[in-house]
Image (tube, rainbow, N blue to C red):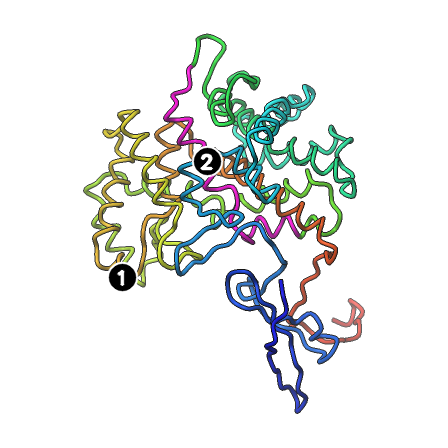
Amino acid sequence: MAETAKTATLTLDGETYELPVLSPSAGPDVVDIRKLYAQADVFTYDPGFTSTASCESAITFIDGDKGELLYRGYPIDQLAEKSHYLEVCYLLLNGELPNKTELEDFEYRITRHTMVHEQMHNFFRGFRRDSHPMATMVGVVGAMSAFYHDSLDINDPWQREVASMRLIAKLPTIAAMAYKYSVGQPFVYPRNDLGYAENFLNMCFSVPAEPYKVEPALAKAMDRIFTLHADHEQNASTSTVRLAGSSGANPFACIAAGIACLWGPAHGGANQACLEMLREIGTVDQIPEYIARAKDKNDPFRLMGFGHRVYKNFDPRAKVMKESADEVLDLLGVHNNETLQVAKELERIALEDPYFVEKKLYPNVDFYSGIILEAMGFPTSMFTPIFALSRTVGWISQWKEMIEDPTNKIGRPRQLYTGATMRDYVDVSKR
């Protein structure tokens, strides 16, 4: 990030302060307020940090007005169409697309890190069967630091790389184990002869009693879901990972913190909330009533899976996801499923109804990914764990970038204090 010749002037109590303006490679200029407190004895106030750059990053860029998402400069639609998840992982981690030898080596290393320590099976058995898979994942991923002591030193570049490989490789295994445990089926070990997405589907849906073959179209759709969710700039969970990492916490603890944050329905739980909404609507003939409620400002009901906080035009991931949704529904022949019929009719209305068009309430990536995962046979409780394993590479890339940044310091937000001022303690007998 380069400092421009421009400055911003702040006048306060008759004093003038010149603030440097930094120029990014893309996006709006940034006013540098790092020295403002020392110079003027004031903080800035920005709930949710919606107008504050918390870090300098070269990984992901979003232009919400243009509906643009770039991983290391590459448009998401190109990567989803021409690349695959592990190549995208390499890109996010290292900054450039790999050559053939680099990709083969990376895929080999990831594939041979997919098994988890056998004693970790005991952690799962300590949870209730009806535990939400995200609760299980938060605990088990955090516990990885108790098993992999040789990759906890964040100051050792080699240990950081080993930890990165382990997390990317083992999260699908842990997510699949959480699913199998919740449905009372035996754990399925990873297989080195399968690709990343194929392996995950096999661990989720195969059983020892009969052979299971992963449909290529389903593996492709799963790979796309992973790719489209791999990173998304400084969102809540990524910021959580960076904040936890700024204290020097080990990478497994940081990713567990990210998973915990992602669990929130306003973040990673959006596609689960979307499917639950579709089930609440129930049948196609009920849609007009719910559309009317969505348009009523006095009704608390909101349509989930439409529009996006960041993208003000359209979600560039949704177009790619829609193609996969159509392919999966055709392959599985599940068009008679009532929930999916409601989804398709809602999609049609949202794309044609002037109210939705004017307010840009288009179907977003959560809407389509939920449809795909439902059609594949995943329960809604697994939607967020799948999001978590997809996002792990983004979290790790952001954590790694932060650790390697010489200007990195522990996160310490300020506050606008509105509580009581100093007062003397009064004995309980006199209150």
What amino acid type should be assigned to the residue bearing mark 2? Ser
Identify the residue at horizontal 59%, vertical 62% (top origin).
53
Dot 2 crowding, Cα within 10 Å, few <14, some 14–19, many 20+: some
Give the secondary structure at mark 2: loop
Dominant SS in magenta: helix
Quadrant housing the N terminus: bottom right
Q: Is residue 224 magenta?
A: yes
What amino acid type should be assigned to the residue bearing mark 1? Glu
Give the secondary structure at mark 1: helix
Horizontal and vertical percent position of residue 129: 54, 26
- Side of 363 where 392 appears, left or right: right
Question: Residue beneath label 1, please?
Answer: 358
Q: Earlier in the sequence, mark 2 or mark 1?
A: 2
Whole-Å distance between the Cαs marked 2 and 1?
Answer: 34 Å
Start and end of the magenta stretch? Answer: 213-242
Q: Residue furthest bottom?
A: 14
- Side of 117 where 293 appears, left or right: left
Query: Which label lies toward us, 2 or 1?
Result: 2
In front here: 395 or 77?
77
Identify the residue at horizontal 61%, vertical 41% (top origin).
93
Q: Residue furthest top?
A: 209
Q: Is residue 429 magenta?
A: no
Question: Residue beneath label 2, please?
Answer: 83
Q: Is residue 179 above or below residue 32?
A: above
Quadrant housing the C terminus: bottom right
Horizontal and vertical percent position of residue 313: 35, 58
Quadrant of residue 113 within the rendered picture: top right
Labels 2 and 1 touching (C-beta < 8 A):
no
